[in-house]
Structures are given as structure tokens and as C-alpha cells.
Amino acid sequence: MRIFTKLSAPLCLLFVFLCLKTAFSSSIHASSFSTTHLCSHEEALALLQFKTSFSIDYTVPYPPLCGYPPNYSKIESWKEGIDCCSWDGVSCDNVTGHVIALDLSCSFLYGTFPSNSTLFFLRNLQSLNLALNDFRLSKIPPEISQFTRLKHLDVSFSRFSGQVPGEIAHLPKLVSLNLSCNSFDLILETTTLRYLVQNLSEVRELVLSGVNMTSVNPRFFMNLSSSLTTLDLLYTLLRGNFPNSIFRFPNLKKFYLSGSFGERNLTIDLPSSNWSSPLQQLYLGYMDCGRRLPESIGDLKSLQSLSLFYCNLEGSIPTSIGNLSELTFLDLSNNQFSGPILASIGNLRQLTGLDLSSSNFSGQIPPSLANLTQLTSLDLSYNQFSSPIPASIGSLRQLTILYLYSSNLSGQIPPSLANLTQLTSLDLYNNQFSGPIPASIGNLGQLTSLHLYSNNLSGQIPPSLANLTQLTSLDLYNNQFSGPIPASIVFWSHSSFHR
Ligand SMILES: *[C@@H]1O[C@H](CO)[C@@H](O)[C@H](O)[C@H]1NC(C)=O
Ligand SMILES: *[C@@H]1O[C@H](CO)[C@@H](O)[C@H](O)[C@H]1NC(C)=O
Ligand SMILES: *[C@@H]1O[C@H](CO)[C@@H](O)[C@H](O)[C@H]1NC(C)=O
Ligand SMILES: *[C@@H]1O[C@H](CO)[C@@H](O)[C@H](O)[C@H]1NC(C)=O
Ligand SMILES: *[C@@H]1O[C@H](CO)[C@@H](O)[C@H](O)[C@H]1NC(C)=O
Ligand SMILES: *[C@@H]1O[C@H](CO)[C@@H](O)[C@H](O)[C@H]1NC(C)=O
Ligand SMILES: *[C@@H]1O[C@H](CO)[C@@H](O)[C@H](O)[C@H]1NC(C)=O
Ligand SMILES: *[C@@H]1O[C@H](CO)[C@@H](O)[C@H](O)[C@H]1NC(C)=O
Ligand SMILES: *[C@@H]1O[C@H](CO)[C@@H](O)[C@H](O)[C@H]1NC(C)=O
Ligand SMILES: *[C@@H]1O[C@H](CO)[C@@H](O)[C@H](O)[C@H]1NC(C)=O
Ligand SMILES: *[C@@H]1O[C@H](CO)[C@@H](O)[C@H](O)[C@H]1NC(C)=O
Ligand SMILES: *[C@@H]1O[C@H](CO)[C@@H](O)[C@H](O)[C@H]1NC(C)=O
């Protein structure tokens, strides 16, 4: 059960541009640019010409990644007679006047990207951001290699397609490259990747999530520049064994890699010693991570976020995990871990999200969990605990989501749950809870969903449930309640109410 929003990756797949073309025309008149302009006449003309290649379509729903909708395209401000260095999205070198950076992200651009675009006249560009537009499945033009000074290139979320041109490897100064989220229509071939790895000796951020790399042999990633700080390879259709030397990259802070759901054709061996990355975020999913989570994971002292889900891990979680004192997010769900959840998890006091669902944990839920007072989300569902919920759970006062369903829990529902007044979802179904629903549950005024079905709960349904005015889903089905359904509940009961 995935309950947390995992970084931004799934957005790639959910993100769909709806493209409705609106007429837009602009004409360039022969004009004279004032000599006081920093921007050169030629570069201004090139930009204006570029502007005419596209229409601006405000009817396209504004992408969530663009923040609050300005409902305004940057190129609207591009007008002759005004110094191009002052146009939105344009930055010039303040001495030479050359355009050195162009940020056209989120600009509602709609149209095919021409390979003879006048944009390629801007030979001094160091940064080009075309993200979050709709280039209607254009190819990335090979002419991109004319930007020999380019350090930053972002063409993510912009509906480019076809093969990434080999010329991308002719940009030796690239520091960041983002080709992500063009929805598998963009294909990176193994040869191109090999040259890219060889030639981009200064690259620090490489973001390729959602790029179709079916044909790529993962071993080529081994030779990436040691300057690398970010490597994002989510949903790339990679297969084979990913070199674990990646964990020795001296500057790597973020590493995201996933295989394909339902297969285990991508593997990586977590090293048993000598991790040398200053990793802060590690995200591995839908792959085979080599059975054991090594004790050495505790060496990654800078880790803030650790997700190893659907990784085919088994055995116990090493005690050393308690050393990761910077951790704010831990997801080890959908593995085959067994044995009790270690008490040392209570050391991770910065945690705001913990997901250990869908494994084979048994024994008790450790009372030390009560130390994780920053938790807003806790999912321990689909395990084999055979124990009660510790009353100390009442200290997790920031919790908004608590999933403990289908986990063989028993005993009474602790009245201390009433302390969790921020809860919006409480799912305890499919366990062996007995005794009454504590009347104090009426304190949980933020609850929108309460699922207690398939337990052995008995006694009367407390009238205080009527306090839960935000509830949109209530399910008490398959228990042993007695007495009438309180009138206060019947009064507002919803179609989703099941006794
Ligand atoms: C944006 O502005 C256009 C007109 O320029 C208008 O038709 C459209 O409804 C606006 N969209 C939003 C989301 O405000
Ligand atoms: C150019 O801009 C940079 C940074 O914006 C600034 O530090 C520098 O002083 C400026 N140079 C001139 C000549 O204005
Ligand atoms: C680009 O090529 C198209 C035809 O392929 C032509 O119509 C257009 O004028 C050319 N644009 C420029 C700026 O050369
Ligand atoms: C590496 O980049 C240089 C230009 O900087 C280019 O001449 C060379 O062909 C590139 N190598 C490959 C394999 O693309
Ligand atoms: C693309 O990746 C770069 C480098 O990590 C990042 O700075 C940028 O925000 C990303 N673009 C989008 C639209 O997320
Ligand atoms: C990925 O690219 C290959 C060609 O390299 C193609 O056969 C395959 O259909 C593509 N996959 C998807 C999901 O588009
Ligand atoms: C990595 O680079 C080394 C030295 O340039 C080379 O010998 C080796 O074949 C490369 N490995 C891969 C997988 O590209
Ligand atoms: C991927 O794994 C499945 C089994 O999970 C296997 O049947 C299939 O042949 C594998 N495909 C490749 C390309 O390795
Ligand atoms: C780990 O590092 C130590 C010291 O640098 C070295 O002796 C050892 O061989 C390394 N182990 C592995 C598995 O690389
Ligand atoms: C939990 O906190 C208490 C007191 O703050 C401390 O004594 C105990 O050792 C902690 N337990 C764990 C597992 O961190
Ligand atoms: C619940 O709150 C009450 C009073 O606010 C407090 O006395 C009690 O210790 C709390 N229980 C837990 C388990 O935190
Ligand atoms: C119902 O809610 C009110 C405040 O909204 C609170 O004072 C009262 O204690 C609640 N009743 C129960 C039984 O929780």
C-alpha cells in the first residue's frame, strides 16, 4: 500500500498535456533597436523569430509543477523596441550583452520545435530551460550541439519524442541535464548514453526519469563523472545489473532508480562496506536489491530519505538503522522482512513518514515508536504482529494517517488513540481487535475515513461517533456489536456506512 507521495516521480506518468491550439500571431516589423540596448539587434531578432514558431495556449490546464498559475507566458513581454535583456525569461551577460540564459519553462508554448530554429543563433547560451511546454512530439534537434557553452539544459515535461540525438554528447560543459518526463516517447540509446557518460566530464545532475532506456546496458553508468551529485533513473525500463560502484561516488547525494512494476529484471547489490557517498536521498524500487539490507546502511549518516520498496529484501532490519539520525522519511514496504520491528527505530526522532507495510514483521509493535513524535504518517499494514497496539501510540500527536489493517493485531483499541486529534484516516480493519470502540474516538474530529470492519469488536457503537462530522467513509461491518445504532449516527449516516 503506497501512502506517501513519493518525491515527484509519479507525476511523470500522470502528467498529460491537453493541447488545444489557439490562434496566435505576431509579426516582426523591420525596426531599429535603440543603440542603448544591451541586447544586440541580431539576438533580439532571433528571439522574436523564435517566438513566432509557437502559439501560446492558455486553455491548456496549467501544470501543477509550475506553481500558482500566472496565466501569462513569458514570451508575451517580448516586444521590439524594448531591450531584450529585460524580457521575461531572458538573461544577458551584463558586459557583452549576449543572451546567456533563457528560461521558458511553463510558458504555454505549443508547436513543433523547428530544427532550423533561430534559437541556435544564441551561441553564448549557458542555460536553456524549455520545461513544461508542449512541443508536440518534436525531436530534440541535433543542432543543440551548437550551444557549446551550455551548462544547464532542461527539456523535461515538454513532449519531446524520438531518439535523443547523439549530439547531446558534444556538450562537454553540461553540469545539469534534465530529459525527464517526456512519457517514454523519448528514447535514449545505449551508444548515446555511452558517449554522454564519456564526454560529460563535469556533469553533476543527470535527470533521466521516464526516458525510455530499454536498450541501455546499466554498466555504462559506472563511468559517470565523479562530480555527480544527482542521478535520477526512475521508470526508465532499465534491465540488468546496475553497478554498485555508484555507492562509492564521492559526491552523490540523490540516487533514484526503479525497475518495472511486476518484474525483477533490474538488480543492484547494496554494498556490505565502504559506502562513500554523502547520500541524502536513496530511492530504489521494483527491483532486486540483493536479499539483505546490510548493516553498513547505518554508515550513511547524511540520509534524510530512504525508500527501498519492492526490493525483494528479507531477514531482519539491521540495528544500525537507528544510527540514521537525520532520517525524516523511511519506506521499506513491500519486502519480506521478518522478525520484530527493532526498538532502535525509536531513535529516528526526525521521522515524519514511516512505511513498513506489506512485509512479514511479527511480534510486538515496539513501544519505542512512541518516541517518533514528528510522525504524520504511519503504515504498518499487512504484517503478522499478533499483539495489541501499545497504548503509547497516543504520543504520536502529529499523525494524520494511521494504517494498521490486516496485521493480526489483537486486544482492545487503546483509548489513548483519542489523543491523535490530527488523524484524518484511521484504518484498523481485518485484525482481531475485541472489546468496545472507545467512546473517546469522538475526539478525532478531523477523521474523514474510519474503517474498523472485520474485527471482534463488541458492545454498543458509541454515540460519540456522531462527533465525527468530517467522515466521508465509515465501515464497521463484520463485528459483534450489540444494541441499537445510535440515533445520532443514523441521522447523518452516509451511503458508505456499513455496520
Ligand atoms: C487565462 O486567461 C484566458 C484569457 O487570457 C482565459 O480565457 C482563461 O480562462 C484564463 N484561465 C485561467 C485558469 O484563469
Ligand atoms: C554583472 O552581474 C554580476 C552578477 O549579476 C555582478 O556581480 C557584476 O558586478 C555585474 N557586472 C557589471 C559590470 O555590472
Ligand atoms: C525553417 O525551415 C522551414 C521549412 O523547412 C521554412 O519554412 C522556415 O522559413 C525556416 N525558418 C528559418 C528561420 O529559416
Ligand atoms: C565529445 O565532445 C566533443 C566536442 O566537445 C566532440 O568533438 C566529440 O565527438 C564528442 N565525443 C562523442 C563520442 O560524442
Ligand atoms: C530538472 O532537473 C534539474 C536538475 O536536477 C532541476 O534543477 C530542475 O528543477 C528539473 N526540472 C523540473 C521541471 O523539474
Ligand atoms: C521503448 O523503446 C523501444 C525501442 O527502443 C520500444 O520498442 C518500446 O515500445 C518503448 N517502450 C515504451 C513503453 O514506449
Ligand atoms: C570505463 O572507463 C574505462 C577507462 O576509460 C574503460 O576502460 C572501461 O571500458 C569503461 N567501462 C564502461 C562500462 O564503459
Ligand atoms: C523479466 O522478468 C520476467 C520474470 O519476472 C521474465 O519472464 C522476463 O523474461 C524478463 N525479461 C527480460 C528482458 O529480462
Ligand atoms: C573497503 O575499504 C577498505 C579501506 O579502504 C579496503 O581495504 C577494503 O578492501 C574495501 N572493501 C571493499 C569491499 O571494497
Ligand atoms: C525513547 O525516549 C525515551 C525518553 O525520551 C528514552 O529513554 C528511550 O531510550 C527512547 N527509546 C528509544 C528506542 O529511542
Ligand atoms: C493522552 O493525553 C492525555 C491528556 O492530554 C495524557 O494524560 C496522556 O498521557 C496521553 N496519552 C498518551 C499515550 O500520550
Ligand atoms: C465531541 O466533540 C466535542 C467538541 O467538538 C467535545 O467537547 C466532546 O468531548 C466530544 N465528545 C466525545 C464523546 O468525544
Image (cartoon, rainbow, N blue to C red):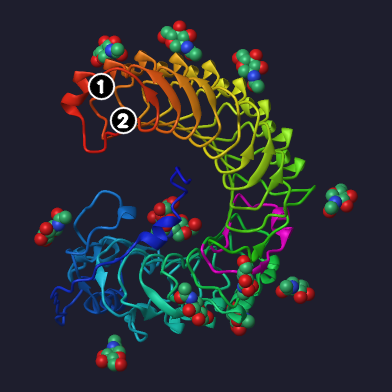
Amino acid, disc 2: Arg
Q: Is residue 239 magenta?
A: yes
Which quarter of the figure is the C terminus placed in? top left
Which residue sits at x=40%, y=28%? 479
**Image-quarter location of ligand 1:** bottom left
Q: Is residue 385 left or right of residue 435?
A: right
Q: Could you say whether the residue bearing mark 2 is in a helix, strand or loop? A: loop
Q: Residue 200: x percent and y percent?
A: 61, 70
CB atoms of marks 1 and 2 within 8 Å? yes
Q: Is residue 115 magenta?
A: no
Q: Residue 233: x percent and y percent?
A: 55, 62
Residue 307 visible here? yes
The magenta span reads 235-260
Q: Residue under circle 1?
A: 485
Q: Could you say whether the residue bearing mark 1 is in a helix, strand or loop? A: loop
Q: Residue under circle 2?
A: 499
Residue 36 visible here? no
Q: Residue 166: x percent and y percent?
A: 54, 82
Amino acid, disc 1: Ile
